[in-house]
Amino acid sequence: MRCLVVGTSGAGKSTFAARLARAIQCPCIELDAH
């Protein structure tokens, strides 16, 4: 499964993505960190 989290700066995308990844037991890859 692949999920893409999109939003404006400061919207909480990273926090939401990390929580979602834990909930569905999948890795979280932040594209702006690479």
Image: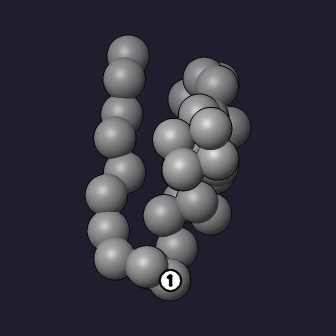
Quarter of the C terminus within the rendering: top right
Q: Is residue 24 left or right of residue 2?
A: right
Q: Residue at x 31, y 58 (%)?
A: 6
Q: Nearer the viewer, residue 22 or 34?
A: 34
Quarter of the N terminus within the rendering: top left
Q: Residue furthest bottom?
A: 10
Q: Position of residue 4 (x, y in %)?
A: 34, 41
Q: Position of residue 22 (x, y in %)?
A: 68, 37
Q: Secondary structure at mark 1?
A: loop
Q: Residue furthest top?
A: 1
Q: Residue at x 50, y 83 (%)?
A: 10
Whether residue 23 is visible here, answered yes or no, is no
Q: Is residue 17 left or right of residue 22?
A: left
Vertical arrangement, residue 31 with respect to residue 5, above or below: above
Give the amino acid at mark 1.
Answer: Gly
Image quadrant in which you'd find residue 11: bottom left
Disc 1 target residue: 10
Q: Is residue 27 left or right of residue 10?
A: right
Q: Residue at x 36, y 23 (%)?
A: 2
Vertical arrangement, residue 19 with respect to residue 4, above or below: below
Image quadrant in which you'd find residue 14: bottom right
Q: Nearer the viewer, residue 15 or 25?
A: 15
Q: Residue at x 60, y 23 (%)?
A: 26
